[in-house]
Image (spheres, grey):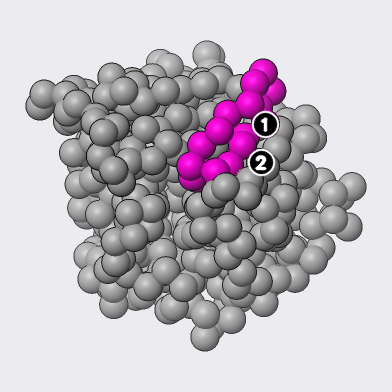
Amino acid sequence: MSEKAISNTDKNSRHIAVIGAGSIGINCALSLQRDGHRVVMIDPLEPGEGCSSGNAGLLARSSFIPLSSPGLLFDVPGWLLDPMGPLAIRWSYLPKLAPWLIRYILAGKKANLQPTADALQHLTDACVDLYAGLAEEAGEPELIKRSSYIYVYESKKSFDKDAGGFDLRRKMNIEVQELGQAEIQAAEPALSPAYQHAYLVPDHGFTLDPLALMRTLAKLFERRGGEVRQTSVQDIVMRSDGCTTLILEDDDLEVDQVVLAAGAYSGKLAAKLGSPVPLDTERGYHITIPRPGAMPSMPVMSGDAKFLATPMSVGLRLAGTVEFAGLDAAPNYKRARNLIKHGQRMFPGLQTDEFSEWMGRRPTLPDSLPVVGRSPKHDNIFFAFGHQHIGLTAGPETGRIIADLVADRRSNIDLTPYRADRF
């Protein structure tokens, strides 16, 4: 496909700054650019090098089950006491985290389950097709692979416990197949025969390299006239003439409109703009093994240990776990190395002589929903952050929503669940 020239002569064209160059920021920038706006994307890191670089790469159409759900409270003590468990809290951070945790637990009421899942599905459902189109436009279609997604279980108890989430997926028109041990082995021979039960979910996808995908889309943005500035935003000054001045680390920038899409770092700027939100960070870890000796053909989720194994061009990525420690605490890479032990249990032939480890900060709000929409306080400020574990998946649809809002186009979905002032 030939590159589309971006014209700035349209009377409706605006100069827009997108703060953040991860999955959400890049997708917002591309969508705004398609509408003819002059867009600058600002991030202290190069595009895609933050949390978006280290995710599990899954394009998870069916990841609309809320993070907090009925019964979760009973699982937490066991997870916290297990050094190999999926959840850890730095106890020094607990006093600050406690109000957020209370809201998180309260959000898990049964009455909230369906409305939250509906709102999340609007952001996730079309992700595979949308990314396939973007990768095609960028000239790198091979970065997106369509596939099934399999949840495997050693324990019948864990399998049965997760049944409610898969029943909800079926209710929301997601195909789910239940597999036994022989069918699991036929689908993924590299897996341990210890897995006796599985849910197979067709019609999903993944990227073979999340960082390469983000870099490719950022280059597409630049080829079409977009500007990328590697600097940090110190402050946002609202002017009486309707424009906005961004106080940057190295300069000041005047723009017509701003999209705040800075992931876990969005909270401080949102508060300065009059919209404090209870945004915290779930620190996630990964291990990437370049020559694993054993590789699945599709993303595999351990339903017992709650981690994901994804086959990538850079090797086998084992990703998952949640750690609450705030934005600034040093990584605890023991959390990452736990994934090696889990991976060896999942794949008996796994070779782990060589690996890399990583930690990233997932921006999470206590009700599992992001903030997407116009600022309640300023008509020319738009919010797009808080996408927890679905930042990659929800990027394209979030970008389309923001572009519609900027253009005053009527959205085909109800944006009320994502409003910043819902707390």
Residue at position x 25%, y 54% in the image = 126
Q: In which quarter of the image is residue 243?
A: top right
Amino acid marked by disc 1: Ile
> What residue is shown with label 2?
236
Name of the residue lying farthest toward the front: 241
Residue 112: image location, x then y, percent? 52, 80
Q: Quadrant of residue 253?
A: top right
Q: Is residue 411 visible?
A: yes
Q: Do the residues labelled 1 and 2 touch (CB within 8 Å)?
A: yes
The label number, if any, that marks residue 30 in the structure image: none
Question: Who is closer to the viewer here, 161 or 149?
Answer: 149
Residue 201: image location, x then y, percent? 27, 57
Q: In which quarter of the image is the N terminus?
A: top left
Q: Is mark 1 on a helix, strand or loop?
A: strand
Tell me if residue 254 is in the magenta stretch: yes
Residue at position x 60%, y 72% in the image = 422
Is 318 positioned to the left or the right of 204 in the image?
A: right
> What residue is shown with label 1?
247
Q: Is mark 2 on a helix, strand or loop?
A: strand
Q: Give the range drawn in magenta.
A: 243-264
**Image vertical order of residue 209 relative to residue 270, above or below:** above
Tell me if residue 375 is in the magenta stretch: no
